[in-house]
């Protein structure tokens, strides 16, 4: 890769749109679901799966289900992308908490972390 191509790739990476979002991790074998929120929802599955594979995920219930039923029983689903660009940090946090609560109630799910 030449210098110009490298600069363009770096610029494109920095300029990409990162979207806050609400997601679900589901275990088909047990029927359980966990809801989480992320500042970059498109990258969360890799992060969660890595933690589960290494046995270091902070939610022990998710980890126990992973160990009992295996990776093939799990799925990751983006439930909602939230546009927070026009909100301040307080507004963003409030909106995301409301949306997480909505999805937890709707799906009868638990929190993924926290």
Image: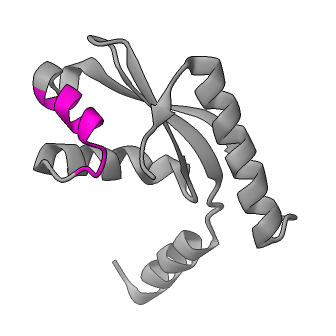
Camera-side residue of 111 and 15: 111
Q: Is residue 10 magenta?
A: no
Outermost residue toward the bottom?
3
Quarter of the image that includes the N terminus: bottom left
Looking at the image, which residue is at 13% across and 48% down? Answer: 55
**Residue 5 located left or right of residue 20:** left
* Magenta segment boundaries in residue numbering: 57-67
Residue 105's place in the image compared with 90, above or below, is above
Q: Is residue 32 visible?
A: yes
Q: Is residue 82 visible?
A: no
Camera-side residue of 64 and 4: 64
**Residue 96 located left or right of residue 3:** right
**Residue 53 located left or right of residue 30:** left
Camera-side residue of 114 and 45: 114
Looking at the image, which residue is at 64% across and 40% down? Answer: 100
Q: Answer with the quarter of the image where residue 26 lies.
A: top left
**Residue 102 located left or right of residue 90:** left
Residue 30, image x, y percentages? 29, 13
- Which secondary structure class fits the magenta region best? helix
Outermost residue toward the right?
86
């Amino acid at each position: 890769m030449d210098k110009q191509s490298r600069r363009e790739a770096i610029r494109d990476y920095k300029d990409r749109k990162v979207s806050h979002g609400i997601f679900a991790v589901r275990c088909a074998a047990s029927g359980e679901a966990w809801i989480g929120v992320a500042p970059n929802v498109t990258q969360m599955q890799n992060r969660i799966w890595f933690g589960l594979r290494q046995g270091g995920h902070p939610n022990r219930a998710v980890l126990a289900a992973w160990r009992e039923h295996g990776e093939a029983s799990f799925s990751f689903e983006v439930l909602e992308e939230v546009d927070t660009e026009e909100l301040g940090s307080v507004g963003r946090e409030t909106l995301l908490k409301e949306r997480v609560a909505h999805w937890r109630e709707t799906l009868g799910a638990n929190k993924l972390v926290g």
